[in-house]
Image (cartoon, rainbow, N blue to C red):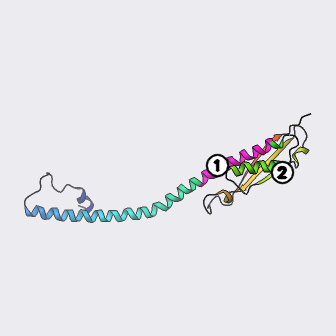
Amino acid sequence: MKLANLCRLPIFPSQSQPSHPQHQAKQFKLEKICRLCRKNRLGAAVVELAVVLPLFLLLVLGMIEFGRMLMVQQILTNASREGARRAVLDKATTSEITTAVNQYLANSGINGATVTVSPNPPSSAAYGEPVSVTVSVPFREVSWLPSPIFLGGRVLTATTAMRRETVQ
C-alpha cells in the first residue's frame, strides 16, 4: 500500500482509543507518516503555484489590456463622430474641428491623437458631398501597461464621414 493511501485510511475503525501499547505505537507511526505526506503535498502546491501564477497573471493582464484597447477604439469613434458633426456645418474650420475632437479625447483621458479632416478646409465641400474626420492614436500612448507585448505597435484609427450641410 502506498504512503499516500495510508494517510487516507482511518487509523482505528472505532472512535475510542485502544489501550494496547502495540496499537499506540502503530498509531504514532501512522501519524508521523501522514505528517510527512502533508509536508510533501505542501511543497508540491507551492511549486504548482509558482508555475501557474505567472501564466494566470499574464492572461488576466492581457484581457484587461484588450478591453482597454476596445474602449479606446470606441472613444476614438465617438470623437471622430463629434468632429464630423462640426465639419458638416457652415463656416466650420479645421482648427475648430481639431479642438472639438481633442477636447472630447481629453475629457476621456486620451492624449497624443492625430486628427485629419478631409477636405481641408471642410467648408470647401459642396452641399451633399462627404466630409470625413479621421482620429488615430498609437496604442502605446493609451496603454495602462508599460509595454504591451502583442498590441504595442498597433495604431487605433476611427473615421467618420458625413454629408455636408449648407444653408442656401
Residue at image coords 19%, 54%: 10
- Using the rendered image of the protein, determine whether residue 161 is visible from the camera's viewpoint: no
**Residues rendered magenta in the picture:** 65-85
Q: Position of residue 69 (x, y in %)?
A: 64, 52
Q: Is residue 22 left or right of residue 129?
A: left
Q: What amino acid is found at the position of numbered circle 1 in the picture?
A: Met
Q: Which residue is mark 1?
A: 71
Is there a contact, CB below 8 Å, between mark 2 and mark 1? no
Q: CA distance from mark 2 to mark 1?
A: 26 Å
User: Would you say the magenta stretch is mainly helix, strand or loop?
Assistant: helix
Mark 1, secondary structure of its residue: helix
Instruction: Specify the quadrant of the image occupied by residue 130.
Output: top right
Residue toward you, 105 or 14: 105
Residue at image coords 57%, 53%: 64
| Precedes in sequence: disc 2 or disc 1 | 1
In reply to whether residue 87 is colored magenta, the answer given is: no
In reply to whether residue 74 is colored magenta, the answer given is: yes
Q: Position of residue 50 (x, y in %)?
A: 44, 64
Residue toward you, 48 or 101: 101
Q: Which residue is mark 2?
A: 95
Q: Nearer the viewer, mark 2 or mark 1?
A: 2
- Using the rendered image of the protein, determine whether residue 34 is visible from the camera's viewpoint: yes
